[in-house]
Amino acid sequence: MKSDFNTSMSLTHTWVSLIVGWAIFFILVTGTLSFFNYDLTRWLEPERPLEINLLQKPQDKQIEAMFDFLSKESQEAKEWYIKLPHIKNQTPNGASRTEIVARSSTNWAKYWYFDPLTLEEVKQTEVRQTEGGELFIDLHHKFYYIDETLGIILTGFLAFFTLVAVVSGVIIHKKVFKDFFTFRANKKQRSWIDMHNITGIITLPFVLMIFYTGLVYYSPHYVTIPYKMIEDKKEQRKDEKQALLDNSSLPIMEKPTANIENMIREAEKKYGIGNIAYIEVGKNNTQGLYIELKPPFGSELTRSESDDTVMRFSGVSGEKLEITNEYSTGTKLFRSLVSLHEAWFASYPLRWLYFICGVLACIMTATGMILYTVKRKEKFERESDKKSLVLEIVERLNIGMIVGLLVGISAFFIANRTLSVNMADRAEWEVNILFLTWAFMIAFAFFRPIKKAWIESLYIASISLAFIPILNYFTTNKHLGVTLKEGDFVLAFVDITMLLFALVFAFLGFRLKKKWSRKDKEDNENKEVLIGEKL
């Protein structure tokens, strides 16, 4: 009975992985890149200034200046939002790392930007059309060229089957601890199994977390009936809340007079020095004019409003007030899981850990797909002199789908630097070039001998990745010679990471070429010996 169960789990792991493997590799690669979507956007928009040595006035002076501006510009608004520059700010949330951003409820679509040192209003830098790092977020969960909702649902099914493959893979592993410390190089099939096992064990917690939280992220698309009932109830409560809000919220009409410096000191005792980034001003019947101080959006895991994440003060007396709009426990849990998936809360060291785990998960997936062909190819060659057409197709698809995708992504970065800045539909063509290059690499794998296709594809990936920082050097003033010298190390690491991966693929291509050349030489010598014996 136990043997039958293990066999069924082994078959489940093999065939489910084969069916979803290439799509999951695509999701993992694009998801891993999206952990640095802000920094990739900075690289893809070289017109933006470097983020170094931010000079700014004390936070209380910045806030006072925004109060002066908004009290004149948006006096009748019911809410003011002020977002101070902070290293954890993300542009998708309407914040900046180098500028003060102000908004008001009279027109949420309008943003005002200010220099944190001079406190003067500034215009946004004009940048080239590009999808930026946001592209990898969209590709990760919606794919491209298909309906958005269909893409989300398809990603959900793939994530579910990946969890099936992961759980079945854990069940069939009998020596998890031993496998973690075992790698046998140059042992053909055994080496691929060891690499697959090691990366699988290391990334197991990460993979389970990232795919489960991914399912939670878009769960309304997968369990529509209960969510429809919840939404209907929420709409009812929203209408009730809006009615209450309309009755209780009042136009601000006045500039807060309380000592903002004292409020900041009080908030910093809880959130840390220099960790106040969001300020909200409002007015209601019960508390009057109030000011809320918050850390950057996403600093806390729950991304929610509560006494733990928001401090509210009277805008007149400065006394501490109670939070009246705290989120429910269910909402906090949902937002916590979403934060884990997106890594919004993560500092750069933790973000790099996410990235490394993502890379290892990609290696786990790639080695699993390669292992499928290696394992069956060795068995087929022992039992027959003929080649298996199915295995050959899968192996060629492995080359095109795995290495070809990385070449396609490299082409996207190269296109960003080579396409005319004034080109129509420029951003769309950057993405088109990614997919056209990927399609070419898949076709390339089918028109070359398999061994040469592997070696040449790896070399193409290496050359294209190495070409990116070289091209960046000749086309912009944000290259390594500038970013390293000026101290913008985050931006510099985009180029450095490209070079490191270029070296990895060059090494892999060299090792394969050396290995297969030696094997071909040995095979030719053995053939000569056999011919000599026959003669």
Image (cartoon, helix red, strand yellow):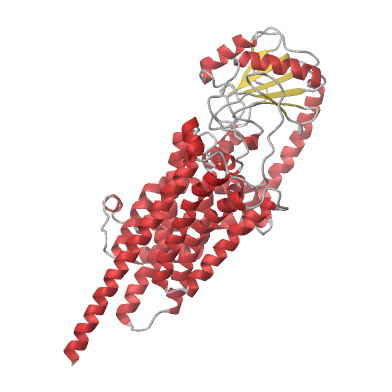
Decide: is 349 above or below 7. Answer: above
Image position of 427 (left or right of 495): right
Residue 81 horizontal/vertical position (percent): 70, 25
Q: Residue at x 65, y 17 (%)?
A: 62
Q: Quadrant of residue 173?
A: bottom left
Decide: is 274 above or below 371. Answer: above
Residue 447 horizontal/vertical position (percent): 49, 74
Image position of 256 (left or right of 263): right
Q: Quadrant of residue 229?
A: top right
Query: Which part of the image, by quadrant, shows the C terminus?
Result: bottom left
Residue 170 horizontal/vertical position (percent): 38, 54
Q: Residue furthest front?
A: 474
Query: Which part of the image, by quadrant, shows the N terminus?
Result: bottom left
Q: Residue furthest bottom?
A: 535
Residue 517 horizontal/vertical position (percent): 30, 70
Q: Can residue 530 be seen by looking at this rendering?
A: yes
Q: Quadrant of residue 234?
A: top right
Q: Residue at x 24, y 82 (%)?
A: 527
Image position of 376 (left or right of 432): left
